[in-house]
Image (cartoon, helix red, strand yellow):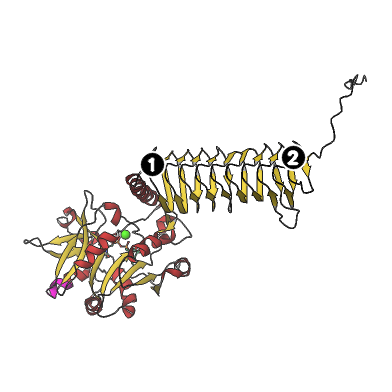
Amino acid sequence: MLSTDIVILAAGKGTRMQSSLPKVLHAIAGQPMLAHVIAAANTVANGNKIIVTGHGAEQVEKATADSGSVFVQQNEQLGTAHAVQMAVPHLRAEATVLILYGDVPLISPATINKMLEAVSAKQIGLLTINLDNPTGYGRIVRNSADEIESIIEQKDASSEQLLINEINTGVMALGAQQLIDWLPQINNNNAQGEYYLTDLIALARANDYSITSIQPTSATEVEGVNNRIQLSQLERAHQLQLAEALMLSGTTLADPNRFDQRGKLTAGTDNFVDVNCIFEGDVVIGSNVRIGANCHISDSSIGDSVEIKANTIIESSHIGAHAILGPFARIRPGTNLGEGSKVGNFVETKNTIVGKGSKINHLSYVGDAELGANVNVGAGTITCNYDGVNKHKTDIGDGAFIGSNSTLIAPVTIGEQGFVAAGSTVTKNVPADTLAVSRSKQQNLEGWKRPTKKED
Ligand code: UD1
Ligand code: CA
């Protein structure tokens, strides 16, 4: 099987980010840019990854420690050829080498694949693109037969070469042995006094290699990030791709430009997502789900035909089919809402199981609790789960009714069909089919007079 060594350059400082965070750790869709490059590299079968770090090396290595990469440090940034040279001791001589960049995050597996296929015995692959404004980039110099002869950097180019629109994206693929042979021949006699990786192209030609140029499917694949404006532009471009994939798989988005996916989203069909929703981590959605505006859903699963009304937040929870949530519900980790249950406005749940058909419709806190089926929790009910030291559980049986503004002091159990009168503070277990009232009886005092204002 062919082996591939993928060298990812990530040593640059990223001065224009104006940040203490190394550039390659700035996030696109909630993941460091470098993590996107690593994910693309991981699609290559039998691929080894060698990451060249420099500025913020420790931070970069820590953030990607579990990526199965080899890290090499480039202590001084003497140029792209010098950076690749750092990786040479880790190359397998028979491997094909692919050069990627930690600050060019959206390179696609399809393009990587095309690049690797372009490499053969006397051939290397170069990823190029035509730009209306090629300023700043290395220009692709072709001969009269239209074959690539060399790359000339902007600062070294003649006024005639500056008119070339085809530019070097920086991504190239070639045999490890060629890199090993040619890198030491590159010098820094150029306008920037740097060791240019781009000089490899002329060296390849001098050694009778031909250069196959590959074009990316979209320009965003090869766009780099130097400042936070470019970061936001790539973020939006990437989000639009994710939104389009979701729409093509059967979800309607009210506005694909107001959609954010930061992680993995798996969805069925005929879902509707209103504007400004954020999906984070691992989210699984069934079919026929409606999600209102401004919802934030992370690491959760949502059953079929669920309705999530606007401004609802759901974290690490499971929502059963046909449940109705919000508006303004806050579903905290460990919530499991049963089929057809309802959690309404200004209700907070945490580590709570809500049985089939149960309702917590208004203004409640229900934490560390287990509710059976068809329970009704009245407005303003609080499970007092915390005694200042420990958390305790509240158990509510099937069909129980908790009157409004009740406080349930855990640990406490309300039996099946139990009934708690509104405004009660429940400190003792309530047996099944029993009414608990824990407030003083109302007295109406006849002839009572309001206080009157004292004369001075
Ligand atoms: C490079 C290419 C240029 C191409 C452009 C595409 C060279 C000489 N030029 O130019 O043809 O059009 O990319 O964006 O390769 N890096 C290191 N160590 C170093 C130098 C750079 O890790 O010593 C990393 C940087 O962090 C960056 C990348 O390599 O991620 C490119 O380096 P940069 O200096 O930005 O190259 P350009 O001048 O943009
Ligand atoms: Ca650059």
- The residue type indicated by label 1 comes to Asp
Our reading of the magenta stretch's main secondary structure is helix
Of the residues under marks 2 and 1, which one precedes in the sequence? 1
Residue 288 colored magenta?
A: no
Q: Quadrant of ligand 1?
A: bottom left
Q: Secondary structure at mark 1?
A: loop
- Label at residue 141: none
Please tell me which residue is depicted at 46% across the width and 45% down the height of the picture.
304
Q: Residue 326: x, y in percent? A: 55, 39
Report the span colored magenta. Answer: 203-208
Q: Residues within 10 Å of mark 1 (few under 14, many from 20)?
A: some
- The residue type indicated by label 2 comes to Val
Q: Secondary structure at mark 2?
A: strand
Q: Classify the position of the N terminus by image quarter.
A: bottom left
Q: Classify the position of the C terminus by image quarter.
A: top right
| Horizontal side, residue 99 vs residue 36: left or right | left
* Residue 182 falls in image quadrant: bottom left
Please tell me which residue is depicted at 23% across the width and 53% down the height of the picture.
134
Q: Which residue is mark 2?
A: 420
Q: Which residue is mark 1?
A: 270
* Residue 118 falls in image quadrant: bottom left
418 versus 104 height, above or below: above
